[in-house]
Image (cartoon, helix red, strand yellow):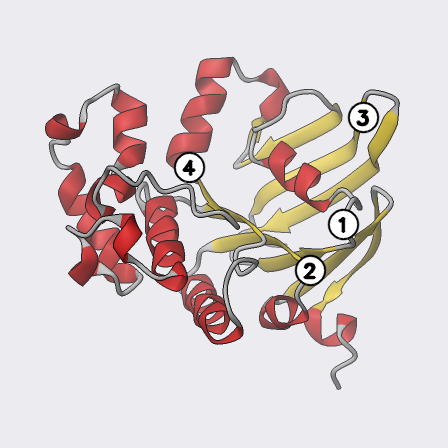
């Protein structure tokens, strides 16, 4: 058994009268690359948001990096999200008035209440993250000058800024064409090979094919949880 990074125990979630998640138990170990798949409305994005501490209203227990999310104060939960977990979304969430470098350094601004002109050592850390995703040459560019694939690489660099142990990705290739999407998938595989744990929500088989494990969710319940070769029927 590896080191536990994420553990859900009998987690349920409601939106009003609608039951979104039903008694979900799931463990993610260090170094895994997991694809969470399911149809629209199956509960997959809701589950990812709960793991990321973006929603605190649920039943059951969620532990991330050894910490019980339900027991954390708002401040401690924010610190965990900002400094130990990286987020990558379908919509890149870059600030158009900031340079690529400043966008990547945003976690430092959020953590310390600084302004852009007071980044201290953060630019060096941001350049390191940009170099890791092959975007260092665009450090001074504005997001409006970038392609979709470049924007997603910048978003990934931002997620890597604090050198997190876990990346949560929600439909990371959803806004990209097939060639650009494959480049992002290849980047995720490289990051995983370096030891980073990735937990991805996707509806795309090409993303799940790159994962080491596929978890399928139906009507708010885990329907299938197998190594990728078994899940995809590959001998």
Name the residue beneath numbered marker 4: 84
* Alpha-carbon span between mark 1 and mark 3: 16 Å
Q: Residue furthest bottom?
A: 235
Q: Residues within 10 Å of mark 1 (few under 14, many from 20)?
A: few
Label 4 vs 3, first from the N-terminus: 3
- Mark on residue 14? 3
Determine the residue positioned at 32% across, 41% down: 162
Q: Which residue is mark 2?
A: 203
Q: Is residue 215 left or right of residue 143?
A: right
- Real-space Cα separation, disc 2 to disc 3, in angstroms: 22 Å
Q: Position of residue 34 (x, y in %)?
A: 62, 58
Disc 1 + disc 3, Cβ < 8 Å = no
Reading the image, the residue beneath label 1 is 40
Give the SS element for disc 2: loop
Mark nearer the N terminus (2 vs 1)? 1
Task: Please say if the residues under marks 2 and 1 sit with CB atoms less than 8 Å apart.
Answer: yes
178 shown above or below 214: below
């Amino acid at each position: 058994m590896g080191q536990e990074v994420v553990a859900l125990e009998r987690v349920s979630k409601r939106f009003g009268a609608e039951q979104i998640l039903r008694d979900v138990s799931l463990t993610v170990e260090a170094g895994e690359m997991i694809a969470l798949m399911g149809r629209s409305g199956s509960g997959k994005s809701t589950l990812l948001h709960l793991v990321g501490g973006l929603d605190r209203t649920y039943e059951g227990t969620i532990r991330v990096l050894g910490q019980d999310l339900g027991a954390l104060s708002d401040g401690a939960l924010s610190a965990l999200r900002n400094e130990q977990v990286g987020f990558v979304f379908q919509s890149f969430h870059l600030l158009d008035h900031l340079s690529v470098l400043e966008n990547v350094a945003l976690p430092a601004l959020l953590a310390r209440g600084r302004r852009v002109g007071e980044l201290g050592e953060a630019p060096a850390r941001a350049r390191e993250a940009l170099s890791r995703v092959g975007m260092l040459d665009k450090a001074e560019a504005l997001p409006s000058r970038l392609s979709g694939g470049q924007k997603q690489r910048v978003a990934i660099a931002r997620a890597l800024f604090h050198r997190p142990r876990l990346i949560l990705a929600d439909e990371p290739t959803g806004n990209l064409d097939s060639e650009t999407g494959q480049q992002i998938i290849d980047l995720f595989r490289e990051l995983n090979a370096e030891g980073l744990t990735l937990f991805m929500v996707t509806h795309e088989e090409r993303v799940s094919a790159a994962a080491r494990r596929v978890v399928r969710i139906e009507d708010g319940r885990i329907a299938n949880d197998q190594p990728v070769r078994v899940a995809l029927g590959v001998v």
